[in-house]
Amino acid sequence: MKRFLLTIASLFAVTALFAQTNEEILARMDAELATLDSNGFSMVMELKIPILGSYSTNMYTRGDKTKALVNVKGEKSILWSDSVTDWEYDVNKNEITITNAKASKSSSDDSMSALEGVTEGYDVKLKKEDDSAWYFVCTKSKTNTNKDDPKKMDLAVSKTTFLPVRTSITQHGVTVTFRDFAKGVDEADVTFDPSLYPNATIVDKR
């Protein structure tokens, strides 16, 4: 009996060792997100707009370079940027448009800012968990007076990588979902290479 009680006590000790609060889990997520830029990262961004439908973009980032694969109702395009120059390849037209890089923040920057410090200004509750992830509901706190912050966010965090598995934000009827975060993007994956499109029409607007 004594040995049995000691075994139970040790199991409780191990459980307590691995138990983590919501704040600890999300702080670890923030720490992992902060390391993504060193070797680049990729993710999928989905946009759901009433009447217009749903669209998805595969995004790749490494340093100042970004690449996005866009498909909107069959209109496919590939976008590159190195913070100095933007390239847009219209797959249907086989046409490449070159412009000076826009001064505004990139979509990847915006998506990252939506995930960083997610607990700030939000009441976070653990909705459920399984073997692979924790699932949180983040509700805007009454003390949060920032009108641009969405009222609610759904967030799933991987128990393996501590990166977001999926997060959804709905505001003004539009739902934005970020999913499939992955570390590591090669330089070649985000660098525009004109030799890959030898027959494309070039439109230089710089």
Image (tube, rainbow, N blue to C red):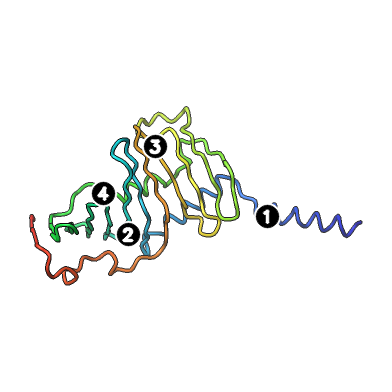
Q: What element carries label 1?
A: helix
Question: Which percent across, then down, holds residue 187?
Answer: 29, 68
Residue at disc 3, secondary structure = strand
Q: How far apart are marks 3 and 4 (CA)?
A: 20 Å
Q: In 3D space, how far apart are the residues under numbered discs 3 and 2 (Cα atoms)?
A: 23 Å
| Vertical placement of residue 175 versus 43, above or below | above
Residue 170: numbered disc: 3
Q: Position of residue 65 (x, y in %)?
A: 26, 60
Residue type for callout 2: Tyr
Nearer to us of marks 3 and 2 is: 3
At 48% from the left edge and 45% from the top edge, which residue is drawn?
155
Marks 2 and 4, Cα distance to the nearest angstrom? 18 Å
Q: Residue at x 60, y 51 (%)?
A: 130
Q: Alpha-carbon neighbours of circle 3 within 10 Å: few (<14), some, or many (≥20)? A: some
> Is the Cβ of the residue at disc 3 closer than 8 Å to that at disc 2?
no
Quote the CA–CA distance across marks 1 and 4: 48 Å
Position of residue 162 relative to residue 154, above or below, is below
Q: Residue at x 86, y 57 (%)?
A: 4
1 or 3: tag closer to the N-terminus:
1
Quickly name the residue at label 2: 60
In this image, 6 relative to 154: left or right?
right
Q: Residue tagged by mark 4?
A: 72
Left or right of 20 in this view: 61: left
